[in-house]
Image (spheres, rainbow, N blue to C red):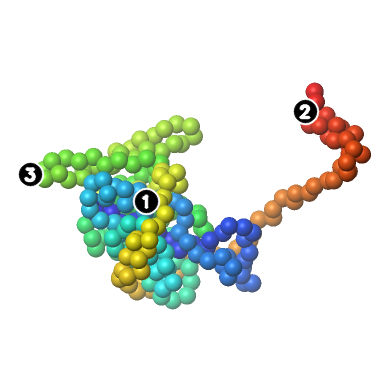
Amino acid sequence: MEILVCVKRVPTVGGAITLTADGQAVDTRMSGFTISPHEECAVEEAVRLVDRHGGSVTVVTLGPVEAEEQLRFCLSLGASKAVLLEACGAGEFGPIATASALASVAESGAFDLVLLGNEASDTGDYQVGIRLAHLLRQPVATGIKALSVAFDGVSGSVEAVSVEAAREYRGVSETFQLPLPAVVTVKEGINLPRYPSLPGRLRAKRASIERIPVQFAPEGLRMRTLRVPVAGQHTATVLGHGVDAVPDLVRVLGELGVLS
């Protein structure tokens, strides 16, 4: 199988989110960048399918030169090839322009399956996978939590002909069968991604990454500003010290219904 996995360079957020002074981006000076958990699971799923059935995994991202770091991380997980769609010009690529750029790579190779994360962890717009499938004129399934491939013998050879994709929606399990080639977006939890091995890291460090320049294409929708939602305030009350706090403790436990 030939599988293409689309990933995105996103800010690493492990604590309080702060914005740049102009309100146009997340301040990453004290954090850094990564790929979203959904996309890490997509890479892992692709590598598992290739380990099981043979083939190769290509990862592609649209972003600045610095996004090579995320591509090398994917290579260390087991991907065979990496393509950087080097964003040229100012501005954040929207979902329409992103899907168009990714389609150029998907169309240039004979990929049986294109995998994406269900949504990027920074914008969460849920659009790129569906728009990409539309441009490729391929079937698409989203929010997938289980994936398997069906094969068929043709002229003495065995070829992948379809994928079975399952997801949970409002408490109901849904299963779709898609003829290949197809586009699938996966959610975190479809698998447990592996940690990069030392040989994998060394191989990724030496690997060459194909660069393709992509000019910025403005869209009808433009981001005006980012805003961090106001978080709820948490307070603590000291009831007292030692035995003097026992009456107040009993009262609080009674109000909580613990003593009833």
Disc number at residue 155? 3
Q: Amino acid at mark 2?
A: Val
Q: Nearer the viewer, mark 1 or mark 3?
A: 1
Mark earlier in primary sequence (3, 2) = 3
Say whether residue 58 is left or right of residue 186. left
Q: Note whether residue 45 is visible.
A: yes
Residue corresponding to mark 2: 258
Give the SS element for disc 2.
Answer: loop
The furthest residue to the bottom:
89
Which secondary structure lies at badge 3?
Answer: loop
Camera-side residue: 135 or 122? 122
Q: x%, y% of residue 137?
A: 28, 52
How far separated are the C-alphas under marks 1 and 3?
31 Å
Give the crowd class for mark 3: few <14, some 14-19, many >=20 residues within 10 Å. Answer: few
Residue 137 seen in render: no
Indicate which disc, 1 or 3, sits on the residue closer to the N terminus. 1
Label placed on residue 44: 1
* Foreground residue among 87 and 67: 67
Q: Quadrant of the C terminus?
A: top right
Amino acid carrying label 1: it is Glu
